[in-house]
Amino acid sequence: MDLSYPKEILFQSIDERINFFEKRTMAHPKLVDSYEDLMGKVDVLSGKGKVLLVYGPSGVGKSTLLKKVRSEFITKFYDDMLEDKGLIPVLSLEAFAPEDGKFDWIDFYTEALRNLDEILIEEKRLPLHEIGVTVPNEKTKRKLRHSLINAVKYRKVKVILIDEAQHMTKVANSKGLRNHMDAIKSLASIFGIPIILFGTYELLSFRNINGQLGRRTTEIHFSRYNSEKVDEIKAFKYVLLYFQKSYPLLEEPDLINEWKYFYKHTIGCVGTLKDWLNDTFNSKMKDNIETKTLVLSDFKRFEPTIDQAYVMASEITSGETQLIEQKEEKENKLNSWLKLDEKEENSEPKSINKRPGERKPKRDKTGT
């Protein structure tokens, strides 16, 4: 692999070199496969008001995938945006973590309207004394929802991207979970455009809550690099090598020979790896302007701890196991319900070919 940056960068300022590496991304196989799968489904489902779930481990690169999808839509509709100044092809926002353990739709609608450059958002909130005590904020929620529906229509939004969407699963009970997914499905149906939820394996609780929701939901699993698969370990090593050669340093650091160390602390998640590499380079460059290269001790300063790696591995394997077990369990139950596991049996006896006039075989009586 050749040096993957112009040599002039070595003579630029520390901040410019740090910024260069932080912006360095790689179209690695897992990212490319997830992107192509997602965009292919979006093209097919465009205009049908579907909900797409993109789930995977924390730190696998889902936010990077979201940015690529957003960039794709902006590029696709760039000329239209020049002609129509009011056009916003992509509504992209993050679902905030609830402070009280319950997802706040008012905050969500408000943030969505801000991203669509809606004016007078606060005027869409009813004063507290008009809301009443029995259903606090319910009227405000409906006003904001109605405003968002109008804004999406007039801004001609083509797709809605929601990052950290697992926060939308924070509810008090299963009924609340179904209500939240019903609300998302209803918005997708009204808008007539895809709504894509990016989140962790917690999004699995949104899967197939009922038949109607299942019919309107499509899934994409953005998985990590699995150490049990030879081709995936090979791909992970290639990712390390790419970033190893992307460091704007006089001497190339050796990451590839320490791949097990980097894998163990990231569990094969490239997003976590890149954040770690960024932090290490940023700190080292600011501490010592004459830095020629990076050594293992530099990376140890910012490594995800074993405790953190253990929690990550536990959550990831739990999510992966849940996916496999749910699929196998549901497939077995479906086969049982449809009687597909039973052997085919013919209710009628097989016919025996006989010549015309030949009687059926039977035992004749003997004696008197």
Image (cartoon, rainbow, N blue to C red):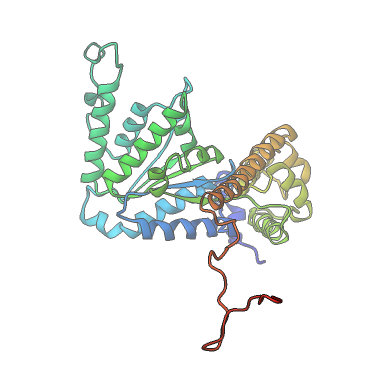
Q: How many marks?
A: 0
Residue at (63, 76) in percent of width and height? 362
Provide residue 251's location: percent of width, then percent of height.
73, 55
Left or right: 66 as drawn, with respect to 291: left
Q: Does 356 sit above or below residue 86?
A: below
Left or right: 118 as drawn, with respect to 364: left
In this rendered view, identify the residue nearer to me: 178 or 344.
344
Left or right: 321 as drawn, with respect to 124: right
User: Does the rendering let one see residue 79?
Assistant: yes
Instruction: Say which quarter of the image contains residue 111.
Output: top left
In this rendered view, identify the residue nearer to me: 58 or 174.
174
Residue at (71, 46) in percent of width and height? 291
> Which image quarter holds the C terminus?
bottom right
> Which image quarter holds the N terminus?
bottom right
User: Does the rendering let one see residue 287?
Assistant: no
Instruction: Say which quarter of the image contains residue 232.
Output: bottom right
Residue at (56, 69) in percent of width and height? 349
Provide residue 268's location: percent of width, then percent of height.
67, 48
Q: Does 106 sit above or below residue 26?
A: above
Q: Does 336 sit above or below residue 280?
A: below
Provide residue 80's location: percent of width, then percent of height.
25, 57
